[in-house]
Image: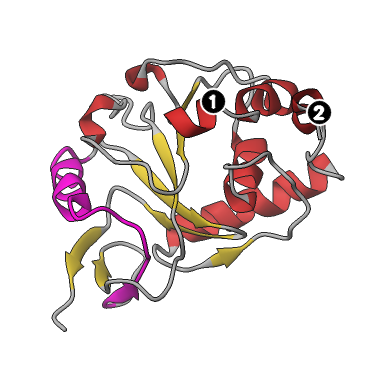
Amino acid sequence: MGLKTEALTGGFAEPVFHSQSVFKMLMDGMACPGTIQTVQPDVAPPAPLGIAAGTIALTLCDHDTPVWLSQGLARSAVPEWFGFHTGAPLTTEKAEARFAFTEAGTALSSFGLFASGTQEYPDRSTTLIIELAELEGGRRLALMGPGIQSVAEIAPIGLPETFLRLWTENRALFPRGVDIVLTAGKRFLCLPRTTKITATEI
């Protein structure tokens, strides 16, 4: 499949219906951090963008939402696919991005380079969509905070060792800070900035 064809295909078959259902899944995911959601494989984004990440992009991104892409995504057919299906402008400035997408294996540096909103408008921040190898089977992490009864556990594979430190720095900015969606293939889970994440004792 040529670059052009790849960029023009693989969008929502029924855009209104699908974007509404995925938006509801995202809202539910943010309300219940760590809960794994599965999208219907209706979307076929170009590699290395995963199905869930592509579905989230089609649901949330439009011409008013600047998007930042990691290097692997920026060098693929993904920029053209974004442009054709969402109209979202791409930015190389992390601080300008409303949404940021990284492919699996991307090294994560400080979240502080992304927009963290302001005290008056904390929602003017970046949401990071981070593709991982898997959402289960990795090092166990404990989640606490709003939307979690006592403790929830996640065990994603592929988060960098520095993730807990980066997340602690992010939480310290509250009410400012970034929100994160971890994706793997067709599945995703949400980590809003209110969530406290710690390593569980083995």
Magenta residues, start to end: 150-174
> Is residue 176 something that shows in the picture?
no
Q: Nearer the viewer, residue 192 or 199?
A: 199
Q: Name the residue type under label 1.
A: Arg
The CA span between labels 1 and 2 is 17 Å
Q: Nearer the viewer, residue 120 or 72?
A: 72
Q: Specify the quadrant of the image occupied by residue 149.
A: bottom left
Vertical comparison of 105 with 124: above or below: below
Mark 2 secondary-structure assignment: helix
Residue 8 image position (x, y, % from top left): 81, 28
Residue 113 image position (x, y, % from top left): 25, 26
Residue wearing tag 1: 75
> Is residue 163 something that shows in the picture?
yes
Residue 100 image position (x, y, % from top left): 44, 32
Residue drawn at 65 percent across, 28 percent down: 77
- The residue positioned farthest toward the bottom in the image shown: 202
In the image, taking residue 85 as reference, residue 79 lies left or right, namely: left
Vertical comparison of 201 with 97: above or below: below
In the image, taking residue 119 as reference, residue 73 lies left or right, namely: right
Looking at the rendered structure, the number of numbered marks drawn on it comes to: 2
Q: Nearer the viewer, residue 60 or 185?
A: 185
Magenta segment: does it hold 161? yes
In the image, taking residue 2 as reference, residue 189 lies left or right, namely: left
In the image, taking residue 153 as reference, residue 181 lies left or right, namely: right
Mark 1 secondary-structure assignment: loop
Residue drawn at 80 percent across, 42 percent down: 12
Quadrant showing the C terminus? bottom left
Q: Report the disc number at residue 8.
A: 2
